[in-house]
């Protein structure tokens, strides 16, 4: 058994602890439910691949984001069925694939075989970041985007290190996938060759400069070819730019902050744990007068520059959300892991074998306990319990895919809209009088309404369901 095996098992246990107990329960953040509803509709033939459909009354043509995420997730519904657990397995799979990408990048840059088995360290630092595990708990677009950009970074880096253009070309394809998932935020790997040259001090290497030029040229040609050969893809991106991106850049919609620097403050907050760990290590070794310069200085600078290139552009708009940082976090995890690696390796080599075996057994027991706890919580509620229980009651009384009337305030209850559509294909309508009507329990309709609808004899916690009496 390798000395690092118990630490790898411990990382698996932490990974499972931060994802499984939530993913096995019902309830999800609004955006994640919305994305799964759109993907589910696409799997059911509602909408087209590059022209997705949300509800009959809200975004019947959905262009708030590019469509690739919905196309891929809809494939999971087509293959594995229509259970609510499909989007959760999809999200978990994205996290696992992300770990694979981390391992590939680690082994690519870790030429010293002594350190190659420490790939668990960047994975541990990455998954322990609060916004990362929250995002993968909630089926966010950034999960898929982060996978695409990570593999773009891997293949471009491999192409630069090996001087093989085929790998950089693969990186270009993953950049395209990233853009078709979340727009221009997926373009940051384009700067990778320049960042590589700067970080590794290869300013006079003409082959690298030629590689960079050819890579950027190929990427541009690839984008032009796709948008020319597939006009529906170009139309989808154009609609997204007009409907979402350009208004956001001009701060005309969903302004979430009045300080462009707030996203960087959020980044520092998310990275509190590794920053504190590194500070403790620095202080400890300075006190012992054993602190030396980082062993992987060039690699640290490279990943630091990549992380900055993935996060700094987010300052261009006042529409900022913490989960926008998810694609950048992994590169800062590499930075901290590379800094801590020599200290950890020295520590691990000094641990007695008896302690190694005990840590191995502890990690196995911990993993078993987490899996058991997750199985115990299967099917319970992580959030929105009352709303979900009421929707289960509605599904027993209202035919699937129906339009349900509602007040304007209820129509703007976006969580309810998302759950109703994902679980029953329902659409809320505030402007007509369909067969069924939903009102809030503490906000009864007026007397004119009572002459048209009758209350159905079912009890719900937050809502009242009505049926036309005429």
Image (cartoon, rainbow, N blue to C red):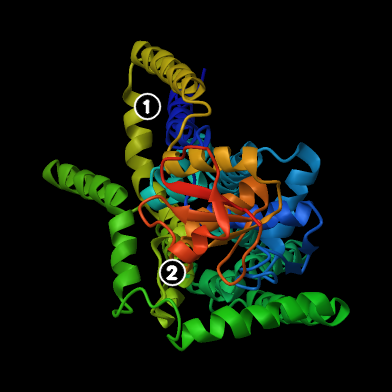
Quarter assignment of residue 97: top right
Q: Identify the secondary structure beneath mark 2.
A: helix
Label 1 vs label 2, nearer the camera: 2
Q: Position of residue 347 (x, y in %)?
A: 32, 31
User: Mark 2: few, some, or many residues within 10 Å (few <14, many ≥20)?
Assistant: many
Instruction: Please name the residue shown 44% across and 60% down the image.
Output: 445
Residue 308 seen from this side: yes
Q: How many marks?
A: 2
Residue farthest bottom in this picture:
250
Label 1, label 2: how far apart the Cα atoms are = 36 Å
Residue 23 picture location, percent across and down: 52, 37
Q: Residues within 10 Å of mark 1 (few under 14, many from 20)?
A: few
Which is nearer the N-term, disc 1 or disc 2? 2
- Residue at the image position 68 percent from the left and 65 percent from the top: 56
Q: Which residue is mark 2?
A: 311
Looking at the picture, tell me which residue is in the foreground, 28 or 258. 28
Residue at numbered disc 1: 349
Query: In the figure, is residue 297 to the left or right of 153?
Result: left
Write the residue at 84% across / 82% down. 228
Quick one: SS at disc 1? helix
User: Which quadrant, please, contains the C terminus?
Assistant: bottom right
Q: Residue furthest right?
A: 229
Q: Quadrant of residue 240?
A: bottom right
Foreground pick, 265 / 54: 54
């Amino acid at each position: 058994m390798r000395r690092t095996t118990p630490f790898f098992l411990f990382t698996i246990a932490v990974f499972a602890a931060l994802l499984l107990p939530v993913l096995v329960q019902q309830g999800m953040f609004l955006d994640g439910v919305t994305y799964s509803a759109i993907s589910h509709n696409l799997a059911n033939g509602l909408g087209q691949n590059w022209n997705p459909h949300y509800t009959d009354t809200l975004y019947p043509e959905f262009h708030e984001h590019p469509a690739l995420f919905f196309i891929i997730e809809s494939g999971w519904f087509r293959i594995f069925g229509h259970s609510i657990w499909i989007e959760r397995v999809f999200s978990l799979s994205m996290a696992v694939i992300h770990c694979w990408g981390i391992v590939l990048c680690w082994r690519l840059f870790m030429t010293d075989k002594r350190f190659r088995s420490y790939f668990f360290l960047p994975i541990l630092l990455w998954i322990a970041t609060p916004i990362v595990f929250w995002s993968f708990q909630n089926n966010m677009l950034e999960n898929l985007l982060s996978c695409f950009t990570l593999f773009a970074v891997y293949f471009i880096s491999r192409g630069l290190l090996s001087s093989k253009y085929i790998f950089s070309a693969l990186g270009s394809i993953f950049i395209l996938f990233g853009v078709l998932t979340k727009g221009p935020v997926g373009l940051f790997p384009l700067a990778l060759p320049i960042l590589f040259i700067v970080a590794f001090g290869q300013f006079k290497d003409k082959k690298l400069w030629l590689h960079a030029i050819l890579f950027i040229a190929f990427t541009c040609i690839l984008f032009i070819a796709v948008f020319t050969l597939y006009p529906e893809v170009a139309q989808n991106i154009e609609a997204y730019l007009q409907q979402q991106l350009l208004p956001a850049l001009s701060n005309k919609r969903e302004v979430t902050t009045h300080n462009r620097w707030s996203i960087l403050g959020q980044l520092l907050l998310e990275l509190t744990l590794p920053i504190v760990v590194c500070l403790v290590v620095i202080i400890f070794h300075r006190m012992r007068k054993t602190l030396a310069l980082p062993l992987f200085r060039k690699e640290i600078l490279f990943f630091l520059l990549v992380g900055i290139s993935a996060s700094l552009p987010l300052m261009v708009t006042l529409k900022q959300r913490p989960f926008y940082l998810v694609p950048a976090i992994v590169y800062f995890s590499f930075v901290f892991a590379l800094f801590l690696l020599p200290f950890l390796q020295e520590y691990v080599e000094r641990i007695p074998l008896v302690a190694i075996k005990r840590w191995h057994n502890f990690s196995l027991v911990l993993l078993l306990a987490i899996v058991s706890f997750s199985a115990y919580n299967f099917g319970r509620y992580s959030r929105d319990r009352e709303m979900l229980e009421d929707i289960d009651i509605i599904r027993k009384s209202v035919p699937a895919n129906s339009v349900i009337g509602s007040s304007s305030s209820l129509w703007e209850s976006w969580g309810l809209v998302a759950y109703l559509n994902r679980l029953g294909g329902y659409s809320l309508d505030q402007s007509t009088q369909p067969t069924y009507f939903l009102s809030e329990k503490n906000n009864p309709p007026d007397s004119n309404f009572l002459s048209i609808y009758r209350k159905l004899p079912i009890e719900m916690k937050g809502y009242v369901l009505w049926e036309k009496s005429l």
